[in-house]
């Protein structure tokens, strides 16, 4: 036995010195820092690319940024002064570098529409969009995941057909048409929900903004009349956005679960006599939760895109309406600032989902 141990140690020692230095596994903290640095570089590169594309579109569009600020009836002296103040006489690459430099200091420019800094406008309106998207995301997850999984388990039954119809309709019907029809039925005819906007006029100013989320602020300050009024306004646009997320999440959940139910370990579990509920939720669901996390992250980003249309239909004072108004007024600072914000949110969500992915699935670390 002692001879065997000695031989093993010699082989181990030889193995560690043959061919030079042995490769040691990197420390987990160092590996995490490397990965984090790589993600930061990717984020900065992507944001620069997004900035360049948005800036180029803003300069190439046949819209005069000077007239967007001064109005059409302006003297030549004033026009030239504003033109020089905006630096429009410089080469476009110098304009871009100047714009990037301002972005780095948090200066997104001034809005010709509101007369305020873009950053101030975004901090005011963006919580309304996030509040709408979060409620829609909750609806999508609570309804979409069980619906998709049940459809997969009961494949070919009535509930499976219903889930497929829901998914097909969600991908086929334009969201603005659904919004208009829902507004006509539930507001104009049935009077079940509030009108356009985030709250009725006579409730405005009763709640002091703390988090920017009106429902939370009203609950914290025990302004329950404001809370229920705000809930009545948000429920319909959130439900419509939530329906489109249900369509996507249920379809993907069904696909993931069908793939797992055909695996050998599921067949073995059933052969051992485990019930359907344990097989599905204890074994199969455990293996698709990481994929579902990725889908939900992508869905949340998609909700921000859908909010651009739904906010316009419902007069919701969020980022979508702000962006739409900026496009209508040729206010390119608003357009570039809004697009940059949406892009930054997309990247942040992707990074968070990537880290959660690694936490839930140790094989990816």
Image (cartoon, rainbow, N blue to C red):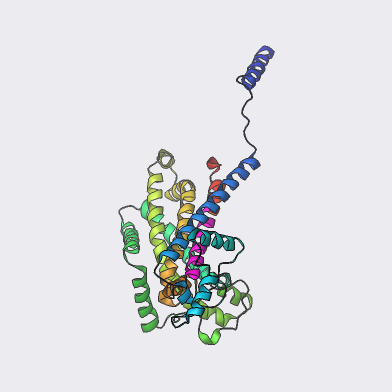
Q: Position of residue 153 (x, y in %)?
A: 38, 51
Q: Quadrant of the N terminus?
A: top right
Quarter residue 213 falls in: bottom right
Q: As rendered, which of 272 and 172 lies closer to the eye?
A: 172
Q: Main secondary structure of the magenta part?
A: helix
Q: Is residue 348 magenta?
A: yes
In the rendered structure, the answer to whether residue 251 lies left or right of residue 99 reads left
Query: Is any part of residue 182 visible from this angle?
Result: yes
131 versus 199 height, above or below? above
Residue at the far front: name it: 77
Quarter of the rendering containing residue 8: top right
> Where are the magenta residues, as a range?
332-350
Q: Nearer the viewer, residue 102 or 186?
A: 102
Which quadrant, please, contains the C terminus? top right
> How many numbered marks appear?
0
Is residue 141 at all visible to an observer of this figure? no
| Above or below for 328 versus 275 | below
Dividing the picture into quadrants, the one containing residue 27 is: top right
The residue sitting at 52% across, 57% down in the picture is: 349
The location of residue 348, given as percent across then percent down, is 54, 57
Q: Seen from this angle, which residue lies furthest top?
A: 3
236 or 153, which lies in front?
236
Percent x, y for residue 109?
55, 69
Instruction: Give the residue displayed 48% in from the left and 55% down from the top.
Output: 49
Q: Is residue 203 magenta?
A: no
Q: Position of residue 128 (x, y in %)?
A: 52, 72
């Amino acid at each position: 036995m002692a001879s065997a141990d000695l031989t093993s140690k010699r082989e181990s020692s030889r193995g560690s010195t043959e061919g030079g230095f042995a490769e040691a596994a990197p420390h987990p903290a160092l590996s995490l820092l490397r990965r984090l640095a790589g993600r930061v570089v990717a984020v900065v590169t992507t944001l620069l690319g997004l900035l360049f594309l948005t800036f180029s579109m803003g300069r190439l569009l046949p819209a005069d940024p000077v007239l967007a600020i001064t109005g059409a009836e302006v003297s030549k002296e004033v026009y030239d002064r504003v033109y020089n103040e905006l630096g429009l006489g410089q080469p476009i690459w110098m304009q871009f570098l100047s714009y990037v430099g301002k972005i780095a200091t948090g200066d997104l420019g001034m809005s010709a529409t509101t007369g305020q800094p873009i950053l101030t406008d975004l901090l005011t309106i963006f919580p309304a969009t996030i509040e709408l998207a979060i409620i829609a995301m909750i609806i999508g997850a609570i309804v979409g995941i069980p619906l998709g999984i049940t459809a997969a388990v009961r494949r070919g039954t009535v509930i499976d057909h219903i889930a497929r119809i829901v998914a097909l309709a969600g991908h086929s019907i334009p969201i603005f048409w659904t919004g208009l029809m829902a507004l006509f039925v539930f507001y104009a005819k049935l009077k079940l929900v509030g009108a356009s906007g985030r709250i009725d006029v006579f409730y405005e100013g009763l709640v002091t903004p703390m988090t920017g989320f009106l429902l939370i602020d009203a609950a914290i300050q025990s302004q329950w009349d404001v809370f229920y009024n705000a809930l009545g306004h948000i429920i319909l646009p959130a439900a419509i956005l939530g329906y489109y997320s249900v369509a996507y999440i249920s379809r993907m959940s069904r696909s993931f679960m069908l793939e797992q139910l055909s695996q050998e370990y599921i067949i073995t579990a059933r052969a051992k006599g485990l019930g359907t509920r344990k097989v599905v939720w204890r074994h199969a669901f455990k293996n698709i939760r990481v994929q579902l996390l990725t889908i939900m992250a992508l869905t949340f980003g998609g909700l921000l895109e859908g909010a651009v249309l739904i906010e316009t239909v419902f007069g919701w004072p969020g980022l979508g309406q702000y962006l739409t108004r900026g496009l209508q007024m040729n206010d390119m600072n608003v357009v570039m600032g809004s697009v940059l914000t949406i892009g930054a949110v997309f990247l942040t969500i992707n990074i968070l989902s990537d880290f959660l992915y690694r936490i839930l699935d140790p094989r990816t670390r």
